[in-house]
C-alpha cells in the first residue's frame, strides 16, 4: 500500500500545507480585488498570494510558488531525504500560445528538488486540472517495483498574468456580478510525497493517508462547445472505476475543483447520481476553488493534500475521500484516499 507522508502548499489559502488545509476546512473565502483589470478596466476578483510582487507574472510566479511548496515537502521527508531515490511528477496547465514554458520550469524544479534527495527523475503532464491523475499510476507502479523510494506528485497554476486574464475575459469565463456562470481566477502550488508503507515505516515517517485508487476519463462537454454536460460519460466512468479499484468501500467525502461554471456542476450531479451506490453519509461535497480561486493543474494535488491533512489531524468528515478534477480539454481524473 502507498501512503502520503509529507505535504507542501503555497497560495492564497496559506503559506504552509497545514494552514491551507485548516483554512479550506473552515470554508473561509480568500478572494479579493487583484492588481489586474479586465477589458472594461474593472479590477478582477481573484485568489492570489498578496505577499508576492504584483508585477511578477506567468512562469516566474509559478516557479516561486512551486519552489516554496516543494521545499516544504522536502523538509517534511526529514533528515533521511538526502538518501532517497525520488520521482517528481509535475502537473501543469495545458499550454496556450506563449504560455508554453513548462519545459524550462520542469527543469528548474527538478534541479531545485535534486539538491535535497539522492537521485531524481522527472515526469510532466500538461493537461490542466486532471493532469495528476495521469501521473500517479506510473508513480505508484515505480514505488511498488522498488525502483524509487518516494514519489512527489504536485502541480502549479497561476492566473496572475495580464495575458491569461485577457484570454479568460475574451472567453467570458471571469466571474463578476453580471456573469455568475464563470470561474474566479486563482493561483496555487501543492505537492504530496508518497511512499510504500513499509518504506515509510523504515524512514520513521507518519502515514497520513493511503492512496487507494486512481482513474481517468474523457468528456465531450467543454467550455468552448455546446455538448450536453448531463451525458457525463467520462466523469461517470472515472468515478465508477475509482470506486471499484479502491475495494468497493463507500466514500463519504468528495473534494472537487469546481468553480461556478454551470456545466461542471451539471456533469457532477449526473455522474454522482449514477454512482450513488458507491457513496455514503455524510456525503460531503467540498469545492475549495469557490473560496480560493481556480486551481488549474494544482487541483488534484491540493485535494490530496487537503484530504491527507484532514485524516491526520482529525477534521475529515469521513475516513474515505475522492478527489475529482476536470481539464478544459475534456480530461477527468478521480483519486481515492483513505485513512492510513
Image (spheres, grey):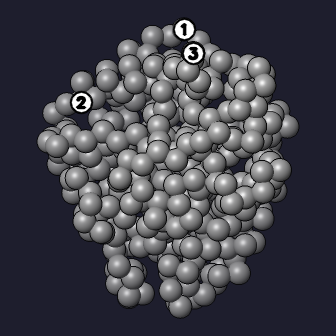
Structural crowding at the residue carrying mark 3, measured as other residues with C-alpha within 10 Å and reported as few (<14), some (14–19) or many (≥20): few
Name which of mark 2 and mark 3 comes first in the sequence.
Answer: 3
Task: Report the front residue among 148 and 186.
Answer: 186
Q: Quadrant of residue 88?
A: bottom right
Q: Quadrant of residue 164?
A: top right
What residue sits right under mark 3 in the picture?
178
Q: Secondary structure at mark 2?
A: loop
Name which of mark 1 and mark 2 comes first in the sequence.
Answer: 1
Q: Secondary structure at mark 1?
A: loop
Q: Position of residue 171 (x, y in %)?
A: 69, 19
Q: Is residue 243 visible?
A: no
Cα–Cα gap, marks 2 and 3: 35 Å
Instruction: Report the quarter where the C terminus lies.
Output: bottom left
Q: Position of residue 134 (x, y in %)?
A: 53, 46
Q: Which mark is residue 226?
A: 1
Label 2 vs label 3, nearer the camera: 3
Q: Which mark is residue 275?
A: 2
Name which of mark 3 and mark 1 comes first in the sequence.
Answer: 3
Cα–Cα gap, marks 3 and 1: 21 Å
Q: Position of residue 338 (x, y in %)?
A: 27, 58
Q: Residue at x 73, y 27 (%)?
A: 42
Q: Residue at x 50, y 86 (%)?
A: 78
Cα–Cα gap, marks 1 and 2: 24 Å
Q: Is residue 302 visible?
A: yes
Q: Position of residue 213 (x, y in %)?
A: 34, 51
Amino acid at each position: 500500500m502507498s501512503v502520503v507522508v509529507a505535504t507542501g502548499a503555497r497560495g492564497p489559502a496559506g503559506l504552509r500545507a497545514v494552514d491551507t488545509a485548516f483554512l479550506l476546512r473552515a470554508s473561509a473565502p480568500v478572494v479579493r480585488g487583484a492588481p489586474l483589470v479586465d477589458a472594461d478596466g474593472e479590477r478582477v476578483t481573484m485568489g492570489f498570494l498578496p505577499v508576492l510582487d504584483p508585477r511578477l507574472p506567468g512562469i516566474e510566479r509559478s516557479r516561486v510558488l512551486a519552489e516554496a511548496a516543494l521545499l516544504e515537502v522536502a523538509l517534511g521527508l526529514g533528515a533521511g531525504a538526502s538518501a532517497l531515490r525520488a520521482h517528481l511528477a509535475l502537473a501543469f496547465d495545458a499550454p496556450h500560445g506563449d504560455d508554453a514554458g513548462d519545459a524550462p520550469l520542469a527543469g528548474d524544479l527538478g534541479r531545485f528538488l535534486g539538491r535535497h534527495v539522492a537521485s531524481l527523475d522527472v515526469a510532466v503532464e500538461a493537461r490542466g486540472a486532471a493532469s495528476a491523475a495521469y501521473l500517479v499510476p506510473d508513480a505508484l507502479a515505480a514505488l511498488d517495483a522498488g525502483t524509487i523510494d518516494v514519489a512527489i506528485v504536485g502541480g502549479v497554476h497561476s492566473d496572475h498574468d495580464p495575458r491569461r486574464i485577457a484570454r479568460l475575459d475574451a472567453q467570458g469565463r471571469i466571474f463578476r456580478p453580471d456573469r455568475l456562470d464563470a470561474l474566479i481566477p486563482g493561483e496555487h502550488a501543492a505537492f504530496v510525497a508518497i511512499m510504500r508503507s513499509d518504506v515509510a515505516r523504515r524512514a520513521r515517517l507518519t502515514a497520513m493517508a493511503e492512496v487507494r485508487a486512481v482513474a481517468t476519463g474523457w468528456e465531450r462537454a467543454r467550455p468552448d462547445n455546446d455538448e450536453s454536460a448531463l451525458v457525463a460519460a467520462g466523469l461517470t466512468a472515472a468515478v465508477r472505476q475509482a470506486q471499484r479499484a479502491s475495494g468497493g468501500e463507500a466514500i463519504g467525502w468528495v473534494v472537487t475543483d469546481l468553480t461556478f461554471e454551470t456545466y461542471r456542476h451539471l456533469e457532477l450531479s449526473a455522474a454522482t447520481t449514477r454512482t450513488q451506490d458507491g457513496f455514503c453519509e455524510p456525503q460531503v461535497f467540498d469545492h475549495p476553488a469557490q473560496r480560493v480561486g481556480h486551481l488549474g493543474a494544482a487541483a488534484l494535488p491540493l485535494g490530496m493534500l487537503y484530504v491527507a491533512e484532514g485524516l491526520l489531524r482529525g477534521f475529515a468528515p469521513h475516513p474515505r475521500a475522492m478527489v475529482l478534477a476536470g481539464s478544459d480539454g475534456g480530461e477527468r481524473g478521480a483519486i481515492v484516499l483513505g485513512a492510513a
